[in-house]
Image (tube, grey):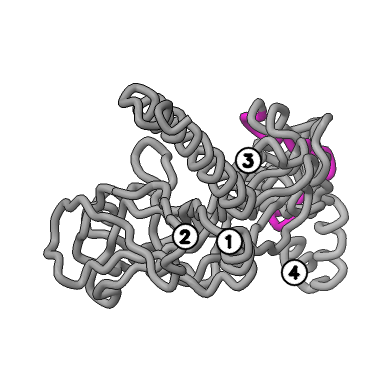
Amino acid sequence: MDKLFDSYWVLRVTALILAVLLFFYVKAQMDTSEQATSANSQMDIITAVPLEVYYDSENLIVSGLPKTVDVTIEGPMAIVLQTKLKRDFKVFVDLNSLMIGRHRVTIQHENFSEKVDVTIDPKIVDIVIEEKVTKELRIDPEMNNGLIAEGYELISMNPEPSTVFVTGAKSVIEDISYVKATVTGEKGINASFEQEAAVKVLDSSLNKLEVTIEPEAVNVKVDIREYSREVPVIIRQRGTPPEGITINSLRPDTELIRVYGPKSIIDALSELPVEFDISDIENSGSYEVDLVAPNGTTKLSTKKIKINANVTKDNNTETNEPVEQPVEENVEETDTENPANDEESTTQ
C-alpha cells in the first residue's frame, strides 16, 4: 500500500481526480449563486416620464425636445419596485450654457439607486435654440357656408377680442400666414348666434404651428340674415288718362326696393314692376300703391310706395259750344228805358 502511494504516477492521477472534482464543485456553487441572483433581479420600463428642461425661457425657445421619455431600469426586484412607485427621480437636459443655434444633447438623469441600471429612450436628441418673439395678430373668423339654410346668407363675423398675442420661435412667427377661429354648427342655420371658437395659427400650407396663443379661444358673433338684394322699381301704366289730362311723368318716391328670398330667385330679378292705374288721375300729386312680391320671394322691404304724378289739363276741353247773344231782347230793353230818344227821332 505504501509502495502504491509512493508511485509517482499514482500521485499524479490522484491529484488530477481531485482537481476535476473541485472544478465541478465550484462550478455548481457559482451556478447556484447566479440563479439566486437572477431570481432577485427585475427589469421594468417606466413610460411617459416628463422631461425637465433648464434654459432661459423668458427669451429663448427650444424645439426638438420630446415632452416625455421612457426609462428602463434593471436591478434588484425590491429597488426596481420602489423606484417605480416613488418616482422621485428625474430626467432632464441643462441648456443654460448653450447659445442660439443647433445642438445635439444627451438626456441626463438623477436620484436613481446605484444598484440599478438606467436606460433612457431617446438618449440623445437634436435641438434648435431660437429667439423668442411675441406678435399681435388679427383673427380671421371662418364658417362653412354649407351650414347656412337655403335663402339665408352670412352677413358678418366679429371675434371678441379681434386680435391675439402669438409667441414662438422667430422662424415660426415668420411662417405665420393665417390666424383662424372656426365656427361650427348643424346644417340649416337661419339665425344669428354667438359661439366660442378656438384660435389656430397656420402656415401657408395650412399646417398648424407650434406657438403659444393668448387667449386660446375667442367669442365670435355671427350675423345671419335672409338673403336679399335691392331691385329697381319700374312703373307700368294701366288704363288711359281722363279726357283732357296729359300724364307728363310718373316717378316713385323710392327707386330701389329690397327683395328677400332664395338666392337663385333673387339674383334672377332685374326689376320690380309696379302697376299704376292712370284712369282716375286728374291732378298732379302723390298716389300710394301696393307692392306685390314676385313669385318665389318671401317679402319686400316695404308693402307700399308713393308715386308722384305730374299731369297737365287741356283748357280747351272745358267747353266746345259758342255763347249765343240775345240781341233782340237787348234792343227792346233799351227803347223802354229811353222813350225820349224815340220821340226826338219822329219829330225830326
Quadrant containing the C terminus is bottom right
Q: CA distance from mark 2 to mark 4?
A: 166 Å
Q: Is residue 104 left or right of residue 29?
A: left
Q: Amino acid at mark 3?
A: Asn
Q: Position of residue 109 (x, y in %)?
A: 37, 65
Marks 1 & 2, CB-CB < 8 Å contact: yes
The residue identified by callout 1 is 80
Above or below, 336 against 250 in this view is below
Q: CA distance from mark 1 to mark 3?
A: 55 Å
Above or below, 121 against 96 in this view is above
Q: Which segment is the magenta one?
A: 269-287
Q: Which mark is residue 22?
A: none
Is residue 281 one of those drawn in magenta? Answer: yes
Q: CA distance from mark 1 to mark 2?
A: 7 Å
Q: CA distance from mark 4 to mark 1?
A: 163 Å
Q: Position of residue 166 (x, y in %)?
A: 37, 65
Q: Residues within 10 Å of mark 1 (few under 14, many from 20)?
A: many
Above or below, 175 against 343 in this view is above
Q: Position of residue 188 (x, y in %)?
A: 80, 41
Q: Amino acid at mark 2?
A: Val
Q: Which mark is residue 341?
A: 4
Frontmost of labels 4 and 3 is 3
